[in-house]
Image (cartoon, coloured by chain):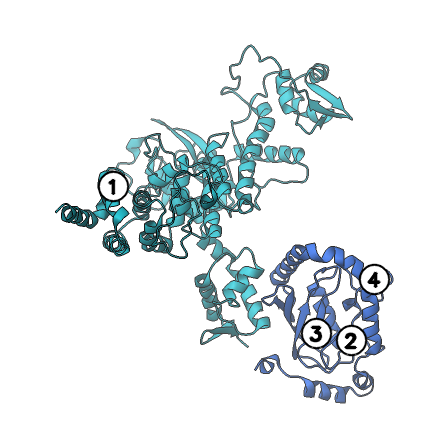
Amino acid sequence: MATSAALSLVRKRTEALFDYVKVWPESKGALLDIKEHIVTATTLEKVSLCTAFIRQVQQRILHAGATTVELLSVYVNVIHAFKLLDARGVLLDKVASPLRGYLRARDDTVSVIAASFLADIDPEGNLVAESDGKVCADIAKAAQTSSLEDTRDDRGLNWDDMNWVPDPIDAGSNHKYNKSEDILSYILGLFDQDDFIKEMTNVLAQHLLQATDPEFAKETRLVELFKSRFDPSKLQAAEVMLKDMRDSVMLEKRILPRRTRATSTPTPRDIQAAIPGEGITLPMLYRQFEGRMKHAQFLAMVKLVANRRNDLYYPKRGRLPSPIDASPSQQGTDSGEPMSFRILSSFFWPQLRSNKFAVPDKFAGTLNHTGEMFSRYSGQRRLEWQDALGRMSVTLELEDRTITEPDIPAWRASVINAFASDELDTGLSFTAEQLQKKLSMDSELVSDALSYWSHKRVLYQPIAAEYAVLERLDMDVAPTSNTAAEEEAFSAVRSEDAVLRENAPMFEIFIANMLRNGGAKEVGGMMGIANMLKMVLPTFTYGEEEVLFLLGEMEGRGEVVREGDMWKVAT
Amino acid sequence: MASRASTMSSSATPSVSQSTKAAAPANGNVIKRLQSELMTLMTSPTPGISAFPTADLTRWNATLSGPADTPYASLSFKLTLAFPANYPYAPPEVLFKTPIYHPNVDMSGRICLDILKPGGQGKEGAWSAALNTESVLLSVQSLLGEPNNASPLNGEAALLWDSNQEEFKRKVLARHVEPSELED
């Protein structure tokens, strides 16, 4: 009687297993019921439990209607729940494989995971900023709580492990029992390491460019986390990116203080801050303070804060007493605009948006000057400004209102500046084409900026396709259309497609030469075109699909011909 | 032929001490160098010359077209290049795969050209690390129009070149096989 009651309970629980998993951890009790049963269950009964669950998963979630975030959070819950049922993960391996396969097939899985790792969550595990279905809170939580220790220990050999249990008898021969299996390793194990790191680097690059934390604590932690899980040498690019960020902050401190404080007399502290750790010559140092203090006064201060060795001055170790007036002296009336910059080592960063356009004159001077300062500090290296990555804060004073837009992309600032730069003529209006020419900016950026400012009701169209400044709100009666300006439609990191299209001519030359010299080839396979391209051209990181796209273009121009599965050069 | 073989072996001996030091760890550098050579070759192509690696990055196939106003005009030739582990400190081995009738090329496609022999002090070759795949192929291409009849590998061809250009051209065409026919 008791056994049949228990069996029917288990049957009921099994039927609703998916629901339990979905609401984990509230359903822990129900799962414990099943666990009780599993301890004594036969292999057959375990298999039927797994098949029942897999069927439920397939019906409920493995379809196009489920978002990737949903899928990932179910996946995380499955891991939690089945780890509870069976600590060694044998059952988990069985039920998770359809889910894993499905997740791998989705295009955006990697980017969702990557974004989740960098998302902000509060201590209760809720997302701080909801970011349009791109972040899975469960993963964010797992990433934040997981340890940085190298977890790839060999559990089977740890003789002090008092929780050790033998392998279950239904473990397959390929069951990997000596791998630590927390949530993170399951998530990271979904994909090929290289693919994942590449995607992760893209997301990290985007994130770093927008980060405000000067310590980059979170990003550093994340990279350390990956280093403990992946081959550390593959994370070189990520580390260089982090270092770039930190170096930029340092350099900013070194170059910018005297710009922002140019009016006040420098203190010994300022001079100390200006002396780089690797030493500097006296004339070089004085050039930074020229015009702000007399040479004799400067020399006295240098003596106070620097040691001299072989014509180079080094900062003294000891700290100076802090100045009595610690309040920041750079307010409003400074000669230069407050600005900050980031210096990226282009080789290690993903391809970034590199459109060039005319930045407002005011900034162009500052940028040039900073570039010169940079070359002075770092020898041979040269700066190239990425105009399109710049962000500016803009305050617009219109007749009836003042609009402040903090932190907008530079192209939007440039466009609105074009309306202001000429004489104060309210009738000033431009078409999109005129702006393109005036700012030598790409049309997509111009139209993005125009729709942004129209949406903000700063610009309006007095006649169709002509834009002018809306000085008073009552000048334009018809509310500008409700088309929401797509926020940040242009990500800083260029999409793979864009990079492919840009590099297509080069890739096609490679293919043509490969086929001319190597004879006819297939696209796929070890010796196929895709693999050969990857081998000789490290920047080619695409697959067979993209190769077929390139071949299609070449076939259209009559450069190659197709013979069955083989492609060869047209003769 | 015999004299050439002996110069090869004698010049190989002094280079051993050099190459054993450089060869093993240099492999990554060789690949890098070849990759960058390939990139230059692809981005600024020279008309009449084309080369591409096989599945092994140190073995390349190349295609040359015969220079105009020579008996080889409008013919195309396949070659292979094999780069040694201490490239560019030693020359690549270049062979004609297409049968060619030429004073400085023997029946198995070997080429007698000073820049293809190890250079440096005490060696008679003219190879230098400043040369690259493109310059090698250009030299081979110009060798077609200006054979070095002073040290022929194919004595008959050398004599014919000087005495009877028409007969020479006839022999060239008789021996030539277009690469597309060669593959089958």
Which mark is nearer the camera, 4 or 3? 4
Chain A painted colour: cyan
Tags 3 and 2 touching, CB below 8 Å: no
Task: Please report the residue visible at 63 percent of the width from the left and 61 percent of the height from the top.
Answer: B38
Q: Chain of mark 1?
A: A
Q: Chain of mark 2?
A: B
Chain letter, colour blue in render: B
Q: Tag 3 or tag 4, which sits nearer the N-term?
A: 4
Residue A198: horizontal and vertical position, in percent? Answer: 48, 49
Q: Are marks 4 and 1 on the same chain?
A: no
Q: CA distance from mark 3 to mark 2?
A: 18 Å
- Quadrant where the N terminus of chain B is found in the figure: bottom right
Tags 4 and 3 touching, CB below 8 Å: no
Q: Is residue A329 above or below residue A75?
A: above
**Residue receiving disc 4:** B14
Task: Please report the residue visible at 33 percent of the width from the left and 33 percent of the height from the top.
Answer: A125
